[in-house]
Image (tube, coloured by chain):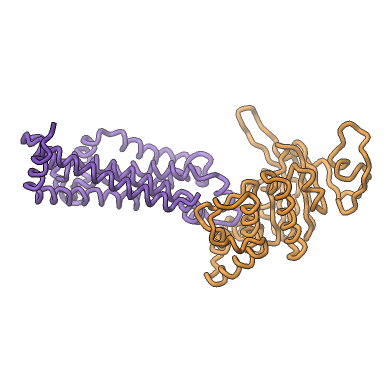
Amino acid sequence: MFDFSLMLEKFMEFRLQIAEAVGETFLMVGISVLAAVLVGLPLGTLLYLTAKGQLRENATWSLILNGFVNIVRSFPFLLLVVFMIPLTRLLVGTAIGTVAASVPLGVVSIAIYARQVEQSLLEVPRGVVEAAQSMGASRLEIVYKFLFVEARSGLVLGLTTSTISFISYSTVMGVVGGGGVGDFAIRYGYQRFETELMAAVIVLMIVLVQLIQFAGSMISRWLDKR
Amino acid sequence: MISLHEVSKSYSSNDGIFQAIDSVSLTVREGSIHGIIGPSGAGKSTLLRMMNVLELPDQGSVIVGGQDLTRLPEHRLREARRSIGMVFQQFHLLHNRTVSGNVSVPLELAGMNKEQREERVKECLQFVGLLDKARQYPARLSGGQKQRVAIARALAHRPAVILCDEPTSSLDSVTTAEILDVLRHINETLGVTIVIVTHEMEVVKEICHEVSVVEQGRLTDGFALEVRAQREGSRAKPSYREQLLGGVGMPDV
């Protein structure tokens, strides 16, 4: 179907552009992962804590946080990118380019990972929380000395799954000049009828995703002593 | 040591209000091993969990070591809980920390430095006979060993009381005897007051000095077990008192 030598040839011909595109993807996904860990992790923890019957049960906050997560996740992603342009301008001064593209990507990342975090925490047996309370642990201590410790392999696995979604989302960031591997494949491969080049880039992305999943699974298994 | 005064607790559900504990008063003597026995769903565990206010009573007071735990502000309650160890039926260990890591947790919460922690963890593991398992993860241990780790953890912060919620109910009889030996040893050598909730008559017979019977959320009987008389019961369904005492009247406690 495909001429593999032609794929390789095209790949080598465009290696500089591809390297640049990979760099852009790494920047966008890197910022997203950072946002997911720094904001999504605490947000997911709050989702867990404010739910009914939990340590910080709070119907109002639970509604607000769930509302945010659900709304962001239900937006068709391209529309979210457009919808967020004013906020992006406010935050980074421009709505065009790789860094600007990272703003809507980061927001989606936070929502996606927050949900994963909530699910991981829900898998920790209730008795662990009870034991923590009986030892006189504060809520903060319960979270980081008990819940995060017991949920850590799930948290890593969730971040792995999320990261792969971020890569997928980042492929459409060409619309705001975000660049990246996906954008490259569309502009150079698809739109210029260089099917082999497009296929070569897709293979590159498959390899990338495999590597991330492999690393994530390894770390998660290593952390899991249950 | 521990007194509950007229404590009550009810839960509302779709089927109406369920009275889990109905005006119970109970005193646990300092240095004793006190059993709380009764059928499933009688409210034994709820009663035990009131003793460190994991379950806040709707009414009544919980006096432990001279202070009413129900009236303490949160940070003082947390402090008070540190001198009340707790052991559970399902152990509730941290599976992602080693045996010594688990025993170390209460000491970390108390802000003890690393050197002192290591020393104390060693002492506690030695006490329950698990020093050789210090670096293992709980997943590799048997049920009885896990429960001994949980006991070492409860012991770590030198508690005055250890509350045990069905500590042997998921263990076989040989392991049960081992765990009861450890608890008795703690009581005898360290003078720690122990409260045990159980539905197993043998557990009470084996180590309790005093026993309270809880049925349908009420305290229906309470007596000492120091002298046991044996007599075959004549009634079809003997009471807990009769099963344990053989029907001979004993002074109430």
Q: Residue at x 91, y 33 (%)?
A: B235
Q: Residue at x 24, y 40 (%)?
A: A169
Q: Residue at x 59, y 70 (%)?
A: B119
What is the letter of the orange chain?
Answer: B
Which of the 4 image quadrants contains residue A101? top left
Nearer the observer, A160 or B32: A160
Q: Is residue A148 visible?
A: yes
Give above or below for A94 relative to B84. Answer: above
In the picture, the quarter occupied by the N terminus of chain B is bottom right
Nearer the observer, A217 or B250: A217
A3 sits left or right of A55 in the view: left
Q: Which x, y percent locates residue A188?
A: 8, 40
Rendered hue of chain A is purple
Q: Which x, y percent locates residue B28?
A: 78, 54
Give above or below for B95 relative to A62. Answer: below
Q: Is residue A61 visible?
A: no
B140 sits left or right of B66 in the view: left
A182 sits left or right of A106 in the view: left
Q: Which x, y percent locates residue B237?
A: 86, 33
Q: Residue at x 18, y 41 (%)?
A: A173
